[in-house]
Image (cartoon, grey):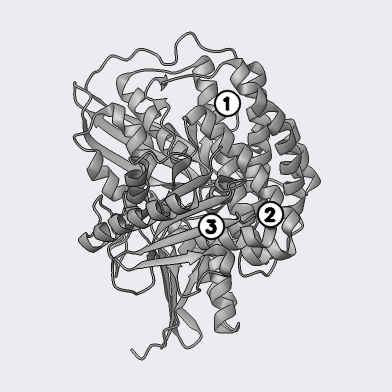
């Protein structure tokens, strides 16, 4: 095949390392391949033979942006295997920690990685020159999230205070008080962020997605719930692998996560918002309404608004937790080891994160499975790109390449804590 | 008060991407007075926060510019924009180079920010540094110590 290859070797504002190849014949898209590096495969092997107690700290290393998500899915899965339930203030603290990570991760993505696309800027450096106020606000807002994670996680990067059964050390009411003041400012800033994102120019683009997220009867989902979809799925987390599986992709070595008999699906903030809008706090619902952002949205470019609404929710929820907090008697519940298999799903900033562990009676991990949100979205990202390239084929190549990157960034793909080049090639026959 | 801050940037689980982390640990072991040592994953906003109000910052990161593995690059951020040919291999795309330029645009660069880049070779999953990189990390630590002694 006589192929024309164009490489776009830029800092692509996608977490990690990815490659996108679009194969064309004339003006027709023949194939779209979006490759991601998957460190979880390495970590699954690395976890075998390690103690259950090491899983939260080891898996936290998979992603520098969402270590809390990995810790949370790990502790819930292992507690499921050991038949332990963590409730009350310990559960609330886990949720508070998760709020911190949502704030950090969403603010980073909204302002530093995604907004420059909508503003027609190459990157946040250009944006900082022309919109310094927004970038300064983003730094301060993100710092509020960092401070929650640093306080509860023991440190900002790779938190170490989380353990199966609870925490190593829990904060006093007094420890949490300074956070509340900062969160009040952050809540206002997040509210302003919702209206700011809603005013960005969005391309006309929609697909008939199946949105998937956790759903919990009493709260917006973070820690737990049932897995539901916009097309009627409603299953327990323990049945995840009976419904979702990894399919070998023809012509490559990649595995795509698919929903049985249905195919591609969509996880992340837009899916959570569409499926759980009624569980948002009043403030977050109001802000979404004012921004005319309604559940049922099928434009993936608008996921930036969903991220902003969730940032506002996380600030509001963090304040609620801090106000209601009474320290637990013990920092963790007692565990008794037994052989078994456990599953856990939590809502990472980027979407549903599934973990399964099989333990022997000494608590040694025999087998681990980790399905991160980005691999679950991979097939949907490819399908978006196929559709997007077909519709915009007349655009000059560099502009098309740039818009493809923007379309990928809709999913905030954590290609993960590896290296950061998105190599884009368009091969024309 | 911290007179100087040393930041090791990288991911210790990605081969030579751990160069900055290993350098930071080796330097921390020397317990130099007035010197604070941090390990960060290279996410830009955390860097901008980390060097806020610190007069003198030394940063070590792995880089991939096509030079011979183990090559040591040195930049002074105040001297001007970082070389465009130098692509950072840190974990995040809003990384060291972007953090420096965003800080410059916002007037948040520390008075002194020196960046050591260690040319890496292997960035695949694993814990070990390539031999050339390990040797270079040792040299970088020596240079950091001399710079710190001269400035404090």
Counting other residues with Cα less than 10 Å from the Cα at mark 3, is it few (<14), some (14-19), or many (20 or more)?
many
- Where residue A206 appears, as percent x and y from the top left, is 62, 61
- Report the Cα–Cα distance between label 3 and label 2: 21 Å
- Subunit ID for the residue under disc 2: A
State left or right for residue B140 relative to residue A231. left
Q: Chain of mark 3?
A: B
Q: Residues within 10 Å of mark 2 (few under 14, many from 20)?
A: many
Give the Cα separation between the discs numbered 1 and 2.
Answer: 37 Å
- Label 1 and label 3 in one chain: no
Q: Residue at the location (47% across, 30% down)?
A: A153
Name the subunit of mark 1.
Answer: A
**Residue A175's mark?**
none
Residue B137 lies, in percent from the top left, at 30, 56
- Residue A319, given in percent of the width and then of the height, sits at 67, 27
Foreground of the two, A369 or A147: A147
| Quarter of the view holding residue B80 | bottom right
Task: Please indicate whether residue B40 sits to the left or right of residue B55 in the image.
Answer: left
Circles 1 and 2 on the same chain: yes
Q: Is residue A2 visible?
A: yes
A202 and B135: which one is in front?
B135
* Residue that mark 1 sits on: A217
Residue A19, located in which quarter of the rendered image? bottom left
In this figure, which residue is indicated by the disc labeled 2? Answer: A135
**Identity of the residue furthest to the bottom in this view:** A2
Residue at horizontal 39%, vertical 20%?
Answer: A165
Question: Could you say whether the residue bearing mark 3 is in a helix, strand or loop?
Answer: strand
Which residue matches tag 3?
B113
């Amino acid at each position: 095949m006589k192929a024309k290859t164009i490489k776009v070797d830029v800092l692509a504002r996608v977490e990690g390392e990815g490659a996108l190849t679009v194969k064309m014949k004339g003006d027709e898209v023949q194939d779209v391949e979006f490759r991601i590096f998957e460190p979880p495969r390495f970590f699954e092997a690395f976890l075998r033979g390690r103690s259950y107690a090491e899983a939260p700290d080891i898996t936290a290393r998979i992603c520098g942006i969402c270590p809390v998500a990995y810790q949370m899915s790990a502790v819930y899965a292992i507690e499921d295997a050991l038949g332990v339930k963590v409730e009350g203030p310990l559960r609330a603290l886990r949720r508070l920690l998760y709020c911190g990570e949502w704030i950090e991760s969403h603010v980073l993505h909204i302002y530093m990685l995604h907004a420059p696309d909508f503003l027609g800027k190459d990157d946040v450096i250009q944006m900082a020159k022309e919109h310094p106020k927004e970038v300064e606000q983003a730094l301060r807002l993100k710092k509020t999230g960092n401070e929650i994670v640093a306080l509860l996680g023991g440190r900002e990067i790779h938190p170490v205070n989380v353990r199966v059964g609870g925490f190593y050390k829990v904060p006093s009411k007094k420890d949490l008080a300074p956070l509340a003041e900062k969160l009040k400012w952050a809540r206002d800033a997040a509210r302003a962020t919702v209206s700011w994102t809603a005013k960005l120019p969005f391309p006309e683009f929609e697909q008939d997605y199946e949105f998937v997220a956790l759903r919990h009867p009493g709260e917006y989902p973070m820690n737990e719930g049932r897995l539901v979809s916009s097309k009627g799925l409603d299953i327990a987390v323990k049945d995840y692998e009976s419904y979702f599986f990894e399919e070998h992709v023809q012509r490559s070595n990649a595995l795509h996560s698919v929903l049985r008999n249905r195919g591609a699906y969509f996880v992340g903030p837009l899916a959570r918002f569409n499926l759980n809008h009624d569980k948002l706090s009043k403030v977050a619902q109001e802000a979404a309404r004012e921004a005319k952002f309604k559940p049922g949205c099928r434009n993936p470019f608008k996921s930036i608004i969903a991220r902003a609404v969730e940032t506002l929710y996380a600030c509001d929820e963090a304040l609620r937790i801090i106000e209601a907090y009474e320290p637990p008697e013990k920092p963790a519940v007692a565990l008794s080891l037994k052989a078994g298999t456990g599953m856990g799903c939590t809502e990472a900033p980027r979407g549903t994160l599934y973990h399964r562990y099989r333990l022997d009676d000494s608590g040694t991990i025999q087998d681990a499975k980790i399905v991160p949100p980005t691999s679950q979205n991979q097939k949907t990202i490819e399908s978006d790109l196929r559709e997007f390239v077909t519709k915009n084929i007349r655009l000059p190549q560099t502009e098309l390449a740039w818009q493809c990157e923007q379309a990928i960034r809709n999913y905030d793909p954590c290609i993960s804590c590896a290296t950061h080049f998105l190599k884009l090639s368009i091969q024309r026959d | 008060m911290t007179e100087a801050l040393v930041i090791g940037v990288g991911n210790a689980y990605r081969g030579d991407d751990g160069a900055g982390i290993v350098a930071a640990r080796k330097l921390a072991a020397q317990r130099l007075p007035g010197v604070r040592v941090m390990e960060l994953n290279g996410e830009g906003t955390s860097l901008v926060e980390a060097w806020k109000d610190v007069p003198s910052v030394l940063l070590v990161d792995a880089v991939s510019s096509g030079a011979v593995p183990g090559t040591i690059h040195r930049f002074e951020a105040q001297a001007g924009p970082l070389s465009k040919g130098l692509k950072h291999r840190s974990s995040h795309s809003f990384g060291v180079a972007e953090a420096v330029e965003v800080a410059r645009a916002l007037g948040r660069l520390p008075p002194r920010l020196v960046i050591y880049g260690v040319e890496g070779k292997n960035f695949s999953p694993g814990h070990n540094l390539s031999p050339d990189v390990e040797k270079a990390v040792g040299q970088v630590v020596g240079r950091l110590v001399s710079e710190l002694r001269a400035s404090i």
